[in-house]
Amino acid sequence: MSPMLIAAVLLTALGTSVLSGIFGMAGGLVLIGVLLVLLPVPQAMALHAVTQIASNGWRALLWRRHICWRPVLAISAGGLVALGGWSLVLLVPDRGVALLMLGASPFLVRALPARWQPDPLRPAHGVATGAAGMSLMVMTGVSGPLLDRVFLGRRLDRREIVATKAAVQALSHTLKLVYFGALVTNPGSVAPWLAAGAVLAAMLGTMLAKRVLEAMTDAQYRRWADRIIAAIGCFYIGQGTWLLLA
């Protein structure tokens, strides 16, 4: 990898970790889109998983008092079931398909009728969300858009959303690393020093974002989170469509 490419990966990891640290979302969505452009799909998925484990794990530790454990356990159980199913197939998605699904996923969840909106505080809904999220992980590298809409639709404050989603995502990305880093591709295909640099950048970005989140109100948080998710989704739909047509 050239020095410019290395710098691009590390700066993206830092910037997206700040974004995720403030909103508990969107950062991983941006990071995987950049990595899919810079790296082969399996390596992009594995490096993204390492970075997101560090970012979400550190964020969950910082906000541990606000974690709601019931949805964490239910969503993780659903993810394990889905991982078992996908391990029989070992699918590696096309880059264009991954980007298109990446952009469409937040809009698809939002389009569900109100009576079908999943409630992460209900165990059965949590298991179903976890299975769907793990499937989205395999196809696009992230389940954040799905979880964003699920958690934003419930009566949780911004700290509970950020903390609980961070705990869920840390476990989900661990499962994704098992899939793409051990089952699909050679574990040694991602340079350890690059993974270590991305981890440090993710942890630094998470720490920088903590004060910004504390200064926001719940109304500001929800308003900006919705806008950011919509903007990123539209961008990836356009990029994925262009790649498929090209």
Image (cartoon, grey):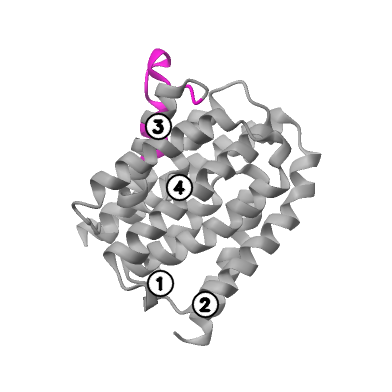
Residue at x 66% of width, y 32% of height:
160
| Secondary structure of the residue carrying numbered label 2 | helix
Considering depth in this image, is 172 or 99 the residue closer to the camera? 172
Residue position marked by numbered label 1 in the rendering? 38
CB under 8 Å between discs 3 and 4: no
CB under 8 Å between discs 4 and 1: no
Considering depth in this image, is 210 or 223 the residue closer to the camera? 210
Whole-percent x and y of residue 82?
30, 41
CA gap, disc 2 and disc 1? 14 Å
| Secondary structure of the residue carrying numbered label 3 | helix
Q: Earlier in the sequence, mark 3 or mark 4?
A: 3
* In-image side of 237 versus 167 (left or right): left
Check the image and report above or below for 164 versus 209.
Answer: above
Q: Quadrant of the N terminus?
A: bottom left
Residue position marked by numbered label 3 in the rendering? 129
**Residue extent of the magenta highlight:** 104-120
| Secondary structure of the residue carrying numbered label 4 | helix
Q: Earlier in the sequence, mark 2 or mark 1?
A: 1
Residue position marked by numbered label 2 in the rendering? 194
Residue position marked by numbered label 4 in the rendering? 172
Residue at x 73% of width, y 37% of height:
65
CA gap, disc 3 and disc 2? 32 Å
Task: Identify residue type, mark 2.
Answer: Leu
